[in-house]
Amino acid sequence: MNEKQPSLPIIIFLISTIIGVGIVSLPRETAVIVGQPNMWISVILGALIAFLNACFIFLLIKRFPNQTLYDFAPKVIGKWIGKLLNIIFVLYTISISAFVIRTMSEIVTYYLLDRTPDVVVLLVLVLSCSYLVSCGLKNIVMFFQLYFPIILTMFFLLTILSIKSIEVTNLRPIFVNDGFSLLKGVNSTFFSFVGYELIMVLSGYQTFTKWRSMTKILGISIASVCTIYVLFFILNIGILSIGELKVITFPTIEMAKTIEYQGFFFERFELLFLFGWIVTIFTTLTAYYYSALLGICKTINCKRNLYVNIFVGAAIFFLSLVPSGITELFSSGTYVNNLSYAALIGIPLILLVVSVTKERFQ
């Protein structure tokens, strides 16, 4: 695929990858850090930083058309160090995958399948994902396009149904002079936009060399997710208040449970949200699963076969079982964030500096 082809599939891929755990847990995390009704500003600031970082990553991949990170890293910095960076990125993608599906498992067993063991939920998701990944990136992108309207419909309906429950007083004051707290909140909101770094994997699927088209793709993708996050932040604050957000584990789901319409044939509106959200979790897992699989194959120079697929699936599955409970799961998020710094900033920065330096001295 070349750059002249439509960018919409890439935009849908990035949006579907970025939206994940953050939409259900981020309001609580930000409320604890910021503690202000205008904490949605931290989301916008996080999105701006994510966009700038994505443009920085584009500076790197545009130097190596039609190549993924796994292809050009060994060429830029040497075979063995390059392979080491590839392995770090693979570990990052596996860690993200494990964290995402374990969080989903905790939510599903708590709200939907309280008698079903976590192991069963995790295994079903990993096996389903491994099958989709085995079909190749082209089919993955098509799958994302197929389910994207369902995700948008779910978000739209939940927003419309929730508006009447908003208490405007919970949203005041809008402008608070504690800007330092808003900046502290950016540390958590920034990581809710991870997913755009996979353009370093998509660069082998579509050529990215033009600033105009790439900034359009990144801008629309991140701005769309930011809009959804800000909207749900406002709904969470308006319906639950800052005080409740600090103590509720998954506030967005609890917000959906507050929706009531007398005489309506459908009563449990949180099920509507959970259905769409589980699809977003599956798309996020698929994108990172594929990136891990591709990374291992390119690093050890093998084809994407069944054995490598099983290895990646098993690694994600067993790593997701490591946390003993929800508290330990959230604590493990700190380690995932540290790996994110390496994948989002460290690896691209090293490769860009080395490639520019080598070019100048040749």
Image (cartoon, rainbow, N blue to C red):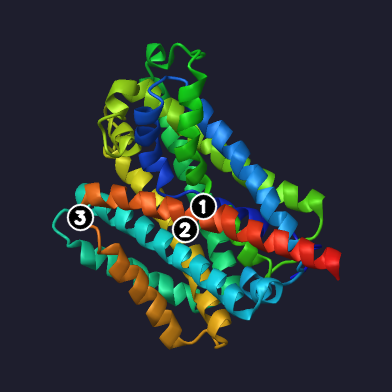
How far from the left and from the top, in percent, is residue 13? 58, 58
Q: Earlier in the sequence, mark 3 or mark 2?
A: 3
Look at 38% across and 23% down and name the residue there: 35
- Which numbered mark, 1 or 3, is in the foreground of this view? 1
- Which numbered mark, 3 or 2, is in the foreground of this view? 2
Badge 3 is on which residue?
113
Quick one: quadrant of the C terminus?
A: bottom right
Disc marking residue 284: 2
Number of marks in the rendered image: 3
Disc marking residue 294: none
Name, please, the residue furthest toward the left.
Answer: 115
* Few, some or many residues within 10 Å of mark 1 (<14, 14–19, 20+): few
* Few, some or many residues within 10 Å of mark 3 (<14, 14–19, 20+): some
Badge 1 is on which residue?
341
67 to 97, vertically: above or below: below
Look at 17% across and 62% down and name the residue there: 117
How far from the left and from the top, in percent, is residue 175? 52, 13
Q: Nearer the viewer, residue 212 or 264?
A: 212
Q: Is residue 281 visible?
A: yes
| Callout 1 touching callout 2 (CB < 8 Å) | no
Q: Earlier in the sequence, mark 1 or mark 3?
A: 3
**Quadrant hosting residue 60:** bottom right
How far from the left and from the top, in percent, is residue 163? 42, 24
- SS at mark 2 in the image: helix
**Quadrant hosting residue 244:** top left
Look at 53% across and 85% down and name the residue there: 300
* Few, some or many residues within 10 Å of mark 2 (<14, 14–19, 20+): many
Q: Nearer the viewer, residue 323 or 236?
A: 323
Type of amino acid at the residue the image marks with label 2:
Thr
